[in-house]
Amino acid sequence: MTLSLRKLCAATSLLFFACGAATAADYPTKPVRLIVPYAAGGSTDSTARLVAKALAQRLGQPFVVENRAGAGGMIGQDVVAKAPADGYMLLFSAAGPLTVTPHAYPKLPYDAIDSFTPIKLVAESPLVLVANPKTGFKTVHDLVEAARAKPGTVTYASFGNGSAAHLAGELFKSIEKVDMVHVPYKGSAPGLVDVISGQVDVMFDVLVSALPHVQNGSLVPLAITLGNRSRLMPEVPTMQEAGVDGFEAGTWFAVLGPKDLPDDVVARLSRALDETMQTPEFQQAMIAQGAEVASGTPESFARFFRAQYDKWGKVAHMAGIKAQ
């Protein structure tokens, strides 16, 4: 009896593992929910929908985008953090909710790093530093000289307290040791209106938002905030080319899952995303919105995520950024 029972248990265990392996290999077998922690219509949402459509084509199941906006992205992220680790609920987020929101809120309902499984860095998008023509700023050096000559008089707009634009301004102030006044707005558009009208001097803005105003001469581009020049503004130098050593800022888009997502599910999603990101259609769509397609493995994205979290946490702490 004992021997027969052992054989039965062994056979049952083998069957269990075989079924588990088959299930993972067949993933996905039902629709996958892709949570976006922003309202519909923005660049994160539009990129998520491109990714969802491509993944559905490659993996044979619908990937349904759900917008869960609010609390600096915390609402959407909390939904994913508490989801089962089976691959049927994923997060598509920009950098802000992952690397700034955790430092702005005194208490999170999830762990900012350990509640998620990094899957893929999809794209990176720079900001562009623009100035009102009446300021006379033609270069970043002109801006720095003016800010040093009259501390606390040069103003810079952003599209919200704690936004990528705000943090870029604070990083710039820290590196260049200048005193500039932050003027937050509820979005890019109202900030640009006041820079164009001369109410505010400069702004770190999303490249595609600023581009038409640069083209018609309403704004002067001073620098791109990532390490490479933008294909949409190839004549504009990077901040480092402009002499601001160590400056890199902007935003990025990525796919993550809940904690403890199985390795084989991560690998399957990563391969499908790689195939998507290498298509000319996806690359052209990213270029059109001022972004560059990223590359790398889930492991390299995990390291990048941690480094970005630490970097912007220091900037947020230095600037005293808190949720409002």
Image: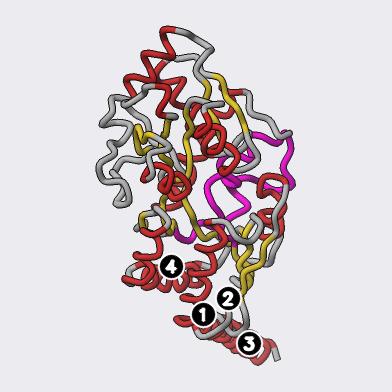
**Is residue 223 among what the camera can see?**
yes
What SS does tag 1 mark? helix
Name the mark on residue 270.
4
Instruction: Out of 304 and 8, give the one closest to the viewer.
Output: 304
What SS does tag 4 mark? helix
Residue 303 point in image, percent of width and height = 43, 47
Q: Which residue is mark 3?
A: 12
Which residue appears at 37% of the width and 31% of the height?
Answer: 247
Name the mark on residue 89.
none
Give, as a single range, the part of the protein colored magenta.
91-120
Which mark's residue is nearer the viewer, 4 or 2? 2
Which mark's residue is nearer the viewer, 2 or 3? 2
What SS does tag 2 mark? strand
Residue type, numbered disc 4 = Ser
Residue type, numbered disc 2 = Phe
Q: Which residue is mark 1?
A: 56
Residue 274 point in image, percent of width and height = 37, 68
Q: How many residues crowd mark 1 within 10 Å: few (<14), some (14–19), many (20+)?
A: some
Q: How many residues crowd mark 2 within 10 Å: few (<14), some (14–19), many (20+)?
A: many
Residue type, numbered disc 3 = Thr
Instruction: Out of 275 and 211, give the one closest to the viewer.
Output: 211
Q: Earlier in the sequence, mark 4 or mark 2?
A: 2
Taking the magenta stretch, the answer to whether it contains residue 114 is yes
Q: Quadrant of the N terminus?
A: bottom right
Residue 57 point in image, percent of width and height = 47, 82
Q: Earlier in the sequence, mark 2 or mark 3?
A: 3
